[in-house]
Image (tube, helix red, strand yellow):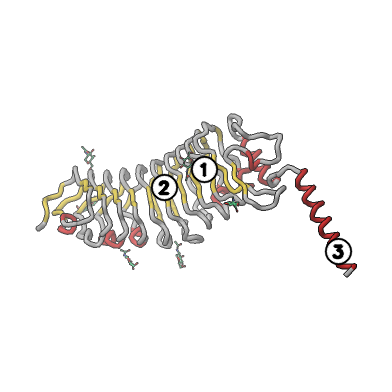
Amino acid sequence: MGISKVSLAFILLAVTFRQRIQGSQEPACNLKDLTALKGFSNCLGSDIGGWNWNSFNCCSWTGITCDNSSFVNKRVVGLELGNKRLAGTICETLVGLEQVRILNLSHNFFHGKIPTNLFRFQNLEVLDLSNNDFVGSLPVVIHLPSIKYFDLSKNHFSSLLSLELCKTSSHIQYINLANNFFGEASLYLENCTSLHYVYLNGNGLSGAFPQNLYRIQYLRILHLQENRFSGPLHYGIGNLSNLVELDISSNGFNGSLPDVFGRLRKLDSFSAGSNSLTGLLPISLVNSPSLSIVDLRNNSLDGASS
Ligand SMILES: *[C@@H]1O[C@H](CO)[C@@H](O)[C@H](O)[C@H]1NC(C)=O
Ligand SMILES: *[C@@H]1O[C@H](CO)[C@@H](O)[C@H](O)[C@H]1NC(C)=O
Ligand SMILES: *[C@@H]1O[C@H](CO)[C@@H](O)[C@H](O)[C@H]1NC(C)=O
Ligand SMILES: *[C@@H]1O[C@H](CO)[C@@H](O)[C@H](O)[C@H]1NC(C)=O
Ligand SMILES: *[C@@H]1O[C@H](CO)[C@@H](O)[C@H](O)[C@H]1NC(C)=O
Ligand SMILES: *[C@@H]1O[C@H](CO)[C@@H](O)[C@H](O)[C@H]1NC(C)=O
């Protein structure tokens, strides 16, 4: 009895002592994260408002979110600095934010190439680098096993677009690479079973309609307009039974429209204007109960085949 009373008193004392230490200490973020942020800010043309280098608690700075782990070793899980008029390049040091889940640097004036290792974050779920002036090509191997949202639209990325995003993860729901200068696409997305939104419009993509897309059965929105795709449209489009919006306008597609609209029961909007389509309108298109917007102007199509 006596002994256990003593040890109980000791435990209580230890707990109080620890609480007092923590109470006197400031919360702080992990040193690796702090170093990564320092390197990141060094590559910018100006200071980031709301970042106080006199404090070790980067978690309280503008745009930064930390996890709830240890009091003095908090990990940065979010860096959201969209629309902050930031200019400069992204330095390799940013890769030190190894726990980051959300990275949003959209609507700024970043330029230059993106360090390849940025495409290797283990926990990254949201990557939004849209509306900047980034250049260069994407790495052949993108290893983002947790990625759900991938937006690189409205930049100056160029050359071959080789996407194999679902080799390691099938969580991705949203891919937006619109309005860049990609010239050729190799899309290996057939394992992307959660993919709902694909925007590839406004590039220089050429070749046939990407066949791999016919297997992404949960696709809801597909934008391929304003590219240089050509050749006929395949019956495989009928596989995309969850499509709500399909835009293939301003390309070089030719031949007749496949009679697959009976299978596209959710299709609300179909735009195929400014191609070289010929032949009769398929009866399933004319009779579609779901379609409310159809744009076929500037082709050589004839009336309904009924
Ligand atoms: C921290 O914990 C709170 C409450 O448990 C939770 O709502 C919040 O999402 C957590 N934040 C992070 C970044 O994990
Ligand atoms: C990124 O930040 C911008 C500007 O604040 C915002 O409009 C956009 O929705 C954010 N992106 C994501 C994926 O949340
Ligand atoms: C798709 O998954 C199969 C089976 O797991 C795998 O063999 C194949 O390499 C994957 N393809 C791509 C492009 O990820
Ligand atoms: C349509 O989907 C089925 C089932 O997923 C698949 O086997 C077939 O290859 C797809 N068609 C095309 C043209 O990709
Ligand atoms: C479509 O265009 C290609 C290449 O210009 C041509 O070889 C093919 O005959 C055309 N097909 C039709 C049906 O007009
Ligand atoms: C019609 O389509 C052709 C390409 O097929 C394009 O060059 C032309 O600008 C389009 N005209 C209009 C008025 O949209």
Give, as a three-letter code, the residue at label 1. Asn
Give the total of numbered labels: 3
- Classify 132 as above or below 19: above
Q: Helix, strand or loop at disc 2?
A: strand
**Mark sitting earlier along the chain (2/1):** 1
Q: Which residue is the site of mark 2? A: 176
Residue 263 is drawn in which quadrant?
A: bottom left
Judged left or right of residue 276, residue 228 is right
Q: Helix, strand or loop at disc 3?
A: helix
Residue 86 is drawn in which quadrant?
A: top right
How packed is label 1: few (under 14 Cα within 10 Å), some, or many (20 or more)? Answer: some
Decide if residue 62 is in sight here: yes
In this rendering, the label closer to the viewer, 3 or 1: 3
- Classify 62 as above or below 246: above
In the picture, the quarter occupied by the N terminus is: bottom right
Q: Which residue is the site of mark 3? A: 7
Residues under numbered marks 2 and 3 in contact, where contact means CB atoms less than 8 Å apart: no
In this rendering, the label closer to the viewer, 2 or 3: 3
- In this rendered view, identify the residue nearer to me: 229 or 95: 95
Identify the residue at image location x=45%, y=38%. Answer: 131
**Mark sitting earlier along the chain (2/3):** 3
Give, as a three-letter code, the residue at label 2. Asn
C-alpha separation, residue under disc 2 versus residue under disc 1: 14 Å
Q: Which residue is the site of mark 1? A: 104
Give, as a three-letter code, the residue at label 3. Ser
Decide if residue 188 is in sight here: no
Identify the residue at image location x=34%, y=55%. Answer: 220
C-alpha separation, residue under disc 3 versus residue under disc 1: 51 Å
